[in-house]
């Protein structure tokens, strides 16, 4: 049987159902409860900082709340990495704000600090002081946080880190998601750990955490009746879903190790093929290798590999199509240097799940190598 090899599929650890069962037994079937509290605590411990963590219904919801807490409103300029998934940019538009897209640099494939400063200066000269910057640790590779933080401090802008795919990634031991004023995580079905769907907001202050919870639970004023002075959202994580999260946290370190080992396997396998390149970690960087991506010699080569894998029932996907190329975002300004356009043309994500076995990995590599 030629069973499908997925790009990145859920990988349960075994204790998830124990926490779900507890929730049922105690009738905590609600968007609050012990699993939510413990999941938040566990995440905070894993991240290893004094940051506060709020469990939410999705990473997108977390980004939306981060923008609201950053004070982003109608017609504000928000500088956003162009090479990303649309969920990094959509919440900017929910706020009626204006995304300005910034291209990537080749060492991490994330937002280019030089281009970012150019954009800041140009926007300032037009009288549009950017309110915030959304930086992404794409495919789990940390962005150049030192340079980016220097800029957000110099120009007094809020730094929001989209670490949706970077749980477990670090720079000099510091976790992605904890560098910015706000960070976000995702536990969607294909992420390094999953709660089926879910996310988290990471923030610095207890007051920010409380405000996020307030907004995520319909902004109810402190009164015996239902009273509202602000627009609220229904963004809190369910206690059932948080039970999955508690189980997944127990195996997170193994999941990171397994994904990193997939990357090493591919790297060794393709080491003799100059038409296939992989992204190395800069000094001091540790990527969780959520997805292993290859950069091929041309668009045609990329397609040849992708379609051959498809015939073998192996899922592979081109890298993200940059936001400045997306029909829905074409009308916004963009600062482009060609890096993400090129990666989109020549790049391919290979199956990278922590549940891939040796047979799967050998099949993928053999299928590709047979083309050379
Ligand atoms: C998955 C992802 C998101 C969105 O997270 P959801 O939980 O699916 O809403 C945002 N940004 C990036 C880079 C992602 O990979």
Image: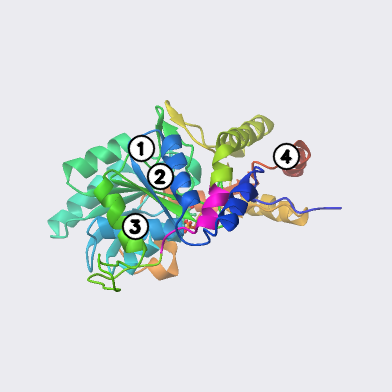
The vertical placement of 129 against 224, above or below, is above
Residue under the point 16% across and 56% down? 129
State left or right for residue 276 relative to residue 176: right
The vertical placement of 213 against 114, above or below, is below
User: CB atoms at circles 2 and 4 under 8 Å apart?
Assistant: no
Mark 2 crowd level (few <14, some 14–19, many ≥20, 10 Å Cα): many
The vertical placement of 76 against 285, above or below, is below
State the residue position of label 2: 110
Residue under the point 46% across and 36% down? 46
Among the two numbered marks 2 and 4 on one chain, the one whose residue lies closer to the N terminus? 2
State the residue position of label 1: 144
Residue 262 shown in magenta: no
Q: Quadrant of residue 368?
A: top right
Per the image, label 1 sits on a secondary structure element best described as loop
Nearer the camera: disc 4 or disc 3: 3
Among the two numbered marks 2 and 1 on one chain, the one whose residue lies closer to the N terminus? 2
State the residue position of label 4: 361
How far is disc 1 from disc 3 in space, using C-alphas?
Answer: 30 Å
- Chain part drawn in magenta: 235-245
Among the two numbered marks 4 and 3 on one chain, the one whose residue lies closer to the N terminus? 3
User: CB atoms at circles 2 and 1 under 8 Å apart?
Assistant: yes
As drawn, the label of residue 213 is: 3
Residue 238 shown in magenta: yes
């Amino acid at each position: 049987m030629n069973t499908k090899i997925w790009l990145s599929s859920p990988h349960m650890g075994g204790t998830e159902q124990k926490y779900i069962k507890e929730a049922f037994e105690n009738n905590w079937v609600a968007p609050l409860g012990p699993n939510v509290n413990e999941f938040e605590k566990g995440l905070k411990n894993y991240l290893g900082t004094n940051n506060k963590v709020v469990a939410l219904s999705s990473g997108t919801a977390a980004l939306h709340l981060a923008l609201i807490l950053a004070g982003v409103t109608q017609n504000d300029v928000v500088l956003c990495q162009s090479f990303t998934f649309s969920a990094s940019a959509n919440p900017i538009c929910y706020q009626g704000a204006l995304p300005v897209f910034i291209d990537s640099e080749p060492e991490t494939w994330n937002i280019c600090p030089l281009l970012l400063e150019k954009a800041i200066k140009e926007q300032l000269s037009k009288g549009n002081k950017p309110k915030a910057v959304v930086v992404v640790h794409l495919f789990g590779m940390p962005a150049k946080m030192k340079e980016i933080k220097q800029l957000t401090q110099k120009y007094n802008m809020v730094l929001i880190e989209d670490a949706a795919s970077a749980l477990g990634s670090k720079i000099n031991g510091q976790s992605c998601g904890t560098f910015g004023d706000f960070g976000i995580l995702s536990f969607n079905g294909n992420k390094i750990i999953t709660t089926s769907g879910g996310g988290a907001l990471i923030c610095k202050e207890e007051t920010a955490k409380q405000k996020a919870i307030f907004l995520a639970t319909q902004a109810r004023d402190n009164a015996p009746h239902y009273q509202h002075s602000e627009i609220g959202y229904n963004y809190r994580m369910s206690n059932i879903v948080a039970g999955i999260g508690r189980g997944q946290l127990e195996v997170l370190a193994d999941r990171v190790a397994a994904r990193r080992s997939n990357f090493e396997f591919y790297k060794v396998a393709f080491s003799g093929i100059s038409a296939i390149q992989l992204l190395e970690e800069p000094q001091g960087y540790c990527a969780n290798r959520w997805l292993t991506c290859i950069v091929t010699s041309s668009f045609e080569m990329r397609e040849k590999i992708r379609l051959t894998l498809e015939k073998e029932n192996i899922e592979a996907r081109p890298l993200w199509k940059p936001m400045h190329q997306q029909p829905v975002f074409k009308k916004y300004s963009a600062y482009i240097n060609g890096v993400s356009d090129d990666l989109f043309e020549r790049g391919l994500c290979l199956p990278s799940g922590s549940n891939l076995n040796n047979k799967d990995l050998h099949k993928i590599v053999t299928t590709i190598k047979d083309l050379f």
